[in-house]
Structures are given as C-alpha cells and as structure tokens.
Amino acid sequence: MSNEGKQLMGSPTSTLPFASHDAPVNVLVVSGNKALRSNLISTLQSPDWKLQEACSGADAFEKVEQGSSEVLLLDPALPDLDASEFKSLLRLQYPYVQILTVNPHSGQPFGTSPTPSPITAKVVERLEQLRPFSTNLSADESSDDDERDTDLRLPGVVGASEVMRRVCRITQLVARRDTTVLITGASGTGKEVVARAIHALSPRRSSPLIVINCAAIPEPLLEAELFGYVKGAFTGAVQSRIGRIHAAQGGTLFLDEIGDMPLGLQSKLLRFLEQGEVQRLGSSDVFQVDVRVVAATNANLRTLAQEQKFREDLYFRLAVFPIDLPPLKERLSDIPALAEVFLAKFCGGRVSLANEALTVLQQHDWPGNVRELRNAIERASILVGDGRQITSEHIVL
C-alpha cells in the first residue's frame, strides 16, 4: 500500500473504527450471483484488501457482525432483501460501514456521492484502474432522512429507546416480505408481541395467524397438531383433522419455543419449509400450502446445533432473518412508558405512579424482563387498594 493510502486510512476524519495504518481494507462482496462475486473478488485481488463474500443479505449481516467489514460491494438483486431494505438495516446497525452498489448484470458500478470516505475512495480508485467502467463507483450515502422520520411504532410494542427503535425499524422492513424470521431473546422480552406485529404489518394480515408453542405440547401430539391426521391414523383419531400449518393457509404460522421441538420432528418441519408441502398422519396425500413462518426461541440454536441437539440445516433455514430482542435491563428508559401501559390495563387510568416507585423500578435488574414488570405493576395495582397513587411500598420485587 502506498504511503498516501496509509495516511488516508489513518486519517482522523475516517468514521471507520477498524481502519489502521498497516491493516488492509476489509471488503465484503454481497451478491446472490456467484459469478459476479468471483468477478469482483478477482478485480480486487491485492495486499491492500482483505476480501470476503456473502451470498445474501442475512449472510452479509452475520459476517459484518462477526468481522470487521469496512466497505460493502452490494449487488442490489439480493435473494432475501431488496437493496433499499438492506441498506436501511445496515445503516441502523452498522453506520460506519460504507456501501458501494454495482450493476448485477454488467458488473458496472453506479451511484454518486460527493464525499466518499478516504478508505472507500481507495477501493473506488482500485476498481477504476482495473476495469473500464463507464460510470464512477462511489459510496452510496444518499439521505435517509425521510426513513429516519418514519413512525417506528409497532402494534403492541412499547418503547422509544435506541435499541427498541432499531428492533421496530427492522421489524417493519421484514414484515412486508415473506421472509422467514427467527426472533430470539430471553424469556419475557416480548417475542410473541413482535411476531404478532410482523403479521399485522404484512400483506397476509387478513389471513390467519396460527400460534403453536412447541414446548407446551407433548411430543407424540405435536406432529399431529402441526400436520394433521386422517381418521384412524392412531388410537383416538375418530375423525380427520387438518393441522395448524394447513390452518394457517395464506397467513402466518408462529412457532414459539422452536428450540424445544423434538429432533425427529425437525426433519419434517424442514421439508415443509423447503417444499411448502404438508402430509397428514395416516395419509399419502400431499397438500401444497402457502404459509409464512415466524419462529421464536430463548435458546441459542447455533450452540444447540453444534451440540447436535438441533438440526443445523433447520437452524439456517429458520434464521434467514434474525431479530434479537434486548433484555429490559438494556432499555431501562422504556420502563415509565411500559409501566403506564400496564397501569392503564389494570387500573383503568385512575392510579398514577409516584416518582419514588418509578425509581425503585428503574433500579431493578429485571431478570424476568417485561413480563416481570407487568407482574410487578399488577401486584401494585392490587396493593394500592382504593388509593390513587402507587408508591414504593406497593412495589414488591
């Protein structure tokens, strides 16, 4: 790398936290087109660059999270997200990453920006030296002011903290599509609330939302619940019945606590996800169904897969678009708004929350998350009796 390039990379004006005087630039090529990825990677072969590739938007997010990507070369024809959605998500979570857009058909770059970062400028310079591009490649830094001003509320979701605003924004974006979503987070963080919001904001909202808790149904019955059965398929099957998957036709199937699904049943669920087909117990007939799947878990499915307690192929099929919900202790600023909602539910607005009680609530670490806060407010609403204000003595934690 030239001295000029090293000076640029070490410039204090750079907003990229991974840049250093000696390190190569981390470039991630994002495209579902293998030929285009190979072409761009061969173009950038140089000690100046550390190259990685991603085959989808979800794959790119995972690599950005795990690595130190500074510049993305983006094919807008992604298999799971369109370009505008992908860029909006990336800017929200990783604002330091520069995005460069390329034509997926010709490999030519496009887009304009008056002020690409110094590191991005070096990538641009390298590409333009090696390819006779007809237009200049530059950072896509178009304004997203209109998007940032968009109402970020979700149905049933309360909170204006930065972490929840990010959750709301990415949920709004993915809700519009049929992409499979995996919602993760500790117990009590509101995974089902987010799943219901996804359905309510989706084009499928006029069709059913079917919820099934994989941990609440005994293993012998779960397969019958999911896939249905015909009369005589097993003892007690006195009449034929469609399963929950079939019942969700045209709508959304929410699989809660997916990490507790028995291994033997996971292969059948994987087949449904890949083929869109349902076969009832005791029948050879196969039905084609159109269902969007949202799953949730408080377990680490990646770890379970490594321990062979969860199918790895099913994990990757479910985690096309992951949404991780933060624990309440990471969003303490949302407690006043959440408390007001619960007070209105339990007291009808006749009771207020004293500042001393709010202080107690905000000093607690909330291992049970939002569910624990809801329970605390419900207890307080009972203990306050005919009083008009909940004080610290009414808060039992």
Image: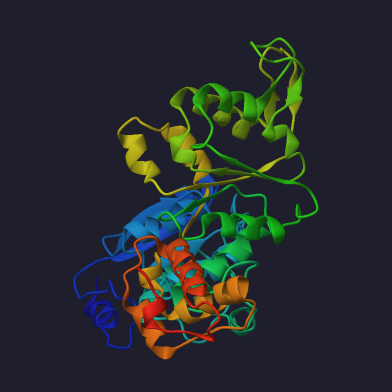
Q: Nearer the viewer, residue 137 or 259?
A: 259
State the residue lying farthest toward the front.
386
Residue shown at the point (71%, 13%) measured from the top left: 283
**Quadrant in which the C terminus appears:** bottom left
- Tell me which colouring the rendered structure shows: rainbow
Q: Is residue 104 above or below residue 225?
A: below
Say left or right for 366 vs 103: left
Q: Nearer the viewer, residue 332 or 144?
A: 332
Say left or right for 225 vs 338: right
Q: Is residue 158 above or below residue 241?
A: below
Say left or right for 54 vs 50: right
Query: Could you say which quadrant of the image residue 78 lies in?
Result: bottom right
Query: Could you say which quadrant of the image residue 289 lies in?
Result: top right
Q: How many marks?
A: 0
Q: Position of residue 89 (x, y in %)?
A: 53, 67
Q: Position of residue 248 (x, y in %)?
A: 73, 40
Residue shown at the point (37%, 70%) measured from the top left: 396
Is there any visible trace of residue 137 in the rendered image?
A: no
**Quadrant in which the N terminus appears:** bottom left
Query: Could you say which quadrant of the image residue 67 lies in?
Result: bottom left
